[in-house]
Amino acid sequence: MGVADDVVTTAGSDLSAHTIPEQDIVRNDLSHRVNSYTQSSLFSGESNVLHRPNPYRRMLVPEAVAEVDFTTPLNAAELTGPRSLVAHRVLGTLYESETVLLPEQGLTELRADFDVFYGAELRRIRESCLSDLEEFAFSFLTDEVDISGRWSVDALDAYFQHAVTEAEQGESAALVAIAGAKEPTVAADTYLIQLALDGLTEASAMSRNLGGAYGPEQSALFKIFIDEFGYGVYEAKHTTIFTKMIRSRAMQTHVHAYWNFYLAGPMATNNYYYYLSRDHSKFFRYAGAVTYAEAVFAPGFVKMIKTYRDIFGDDVDLHYCEEHAHIDQHHGRITREQVLLALAERHGDGVVPELMRGIAEARLLGRWFEDDTAAQIRWADSIAQHRELGEAAMSGGAASAGGATGAGGGSRRVELSLGHPFGTRNHAEAVVLTMEDGEAELVAAATGEPERLARGDAVLVPAGRVYGIRAGSRECAYRLHRTAPEQ
Amino acid sequence: MNRVVVMDLSRHNTVLVGHDRYFVFESNGHLQLVRDRCPHRGGPLSLARLTADGRRLTCPWHGTRVATAALRRTSLPMVRSGDEAIVVLPDVPPDAQVTMVRRRILANLPPADAACHPEDPRSEQGSRNGRAAGHDD
């Protein structure tokens, strides 16, 4: 176990001088193109656990990107796995670079980063790989959701009402996990962070479907959009009241302070709406998806208000949730009557399967959002238990020193120096992390205390769970071991 | 009026709606809920076998050959995700009893002369969802 077959050192790497020959962008495969993008100095991370107020810099963990096989698309079973996490981080960055992001403090200090983020070089790569990366990330939905039979407007409405009733009456997996957590405040913050992904840039995807000319349905969608944007009053804009909510939890409010803690499921959900709205051939899918989302938001926020009031009492600003619990009743009605059913009636039964697909896919992704968040909450809330599992796995021989945990065939030893770029990642299978030298902090949640690790400590990291390691001494090293299948 | 039912495809492959019966038919890799009634004299198409070209079902009652394409056009609105299928049953009287069961579906077996050729993509091993045939009865 003492031989480092595959050493990764994340500290001290200088990626800023990297330049990308134009011919490489054009001719190489998706893997090369994505790696070229993530090699930009904007995406190699900084030592801070949270990102500073700079919307252009976000940690894409280039070494994790380099391990991903982009030749076969994601499948539904790995939505919370490392290929998904990597792909959706990159995809989300590509999408957001097609929106306008400006820092609240002004651009003066960040002009150079602005120029790189929106510059010709990254734009060229973005344009060369966006469609292929979307195919990689979302093509599995074609098999995962199958629409068959003869659909009519009445059948569409019956299915829609069923899906909404199911959501209204069902439980939120994430809220259940929060209520059952030993540290509910940290768990509640983790959920807020997942909402921040959309909450800080709300309705950006929707804005892409406002142009063109498609009749009264266009005006109906615009009514929702202007609600989201506070009727032109910045203080009433939903992103503004979202920041009030997280500020009341003493959390950072800038885009995207908590980037390292966004999970694959929530990112896939957020990216899905960009995916549908970027390509107008998917407009009817978008209309189905957004109708479902608007209809289930209101009851979802009612449940969230109850959970958060139980935990925080009046010490949290839930205006954002109350606004959605109210206005999304109207949005649910408007989208159903004036968008979903109106589109079906105007354009005929031929578009109904696409509207259906959007509803079904949004429903599916919504579940993954909840399940992924709930699993992360449970993992971050039970590190002590996972220490015991890790120690038991090592002492019982259930962990394999020779097990692969990423690219390459050997076990993985990771060496870090104080101040190294901080990033988070996950693994396709459960791994045992053992400290070999020095001290470190295991970070599984953005708020709350990190877990101190010293030489000899072991922690089991479940498959798919996101974590980061921060050096706690000048130098430190840990090793990742694959566990036996029953782990 | 429409009624929505949720099927667990790992457990059920047939829906009984009053006196009507529908079965899960696997065609071209897709599952569809089709009426279990031959248009000739009402024979059970779930017990029909595919013709050698895989394009028709031969009704066990009178040997009527029913095109699978025509059968698919009669399928009920269904959304499948994993083993869950949500089906919209149209024009179901409020008091009609709806039951889901699992039966042996011969229509999902490969054509008789293809079953002995396992390399044939239409053979049982190549089936996308062998459970649609109800083999674990």
Image (tube, grey):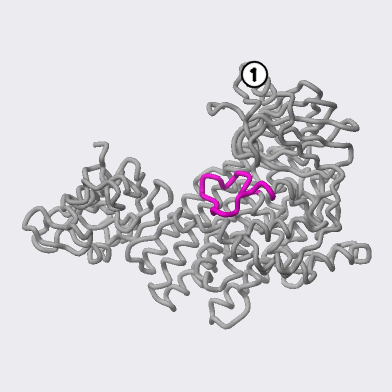
Asked if A97 appears above or below A53 in the picture, the reply is below
Asked if A157 appears above or below A195 in the picture, the reply is below
Q: Which residues are magenta?
A: A66-85
Q: Position of residue A76 (x, y in %)?
A: 51, 48
Q: Is residue A418 magenta?
A: no
Left or right: where B59 falls relative to A437: left
> Is A479 or B14 nearer to us in this picture?
A479
Q: Secondary structure at mark 1?
A: helix
Residue A310 seen in the current view: yes
Residue corresponding to mark 1: A392
Residue shown at 47% from the left, 57% from the top: A360
Q: Quadrant of the C terminus of chain A?
A: top right
Left or right: where A345 falls relative to A417: left
Q: Position of residue A142 (x, y in %)?
A: 46, 58
Q: Position of residue B108 (x, y in %)?
A: 24, 50
Q: Residues within 10 Å of mark 1 (few under 14, many from 20)?
A: some
> Is A380 or B129 nearer to us in this picture?
B129
Residue shown at 62% from the left, 48% from the top: A83
Where residue A427 sits, quadrant-wise, is top right
Q: Quadrant of the N terminus of chain A?
A: top right
Three-letter residue code for mark 1: Ala
Judged from this view, the residue extending furthest toward the right is A108
Left or right: where A214 falls relative to B59: right
Q: Is residue A76 magenta?
A: yes
Left or right: where A278 falls relative to B99: right
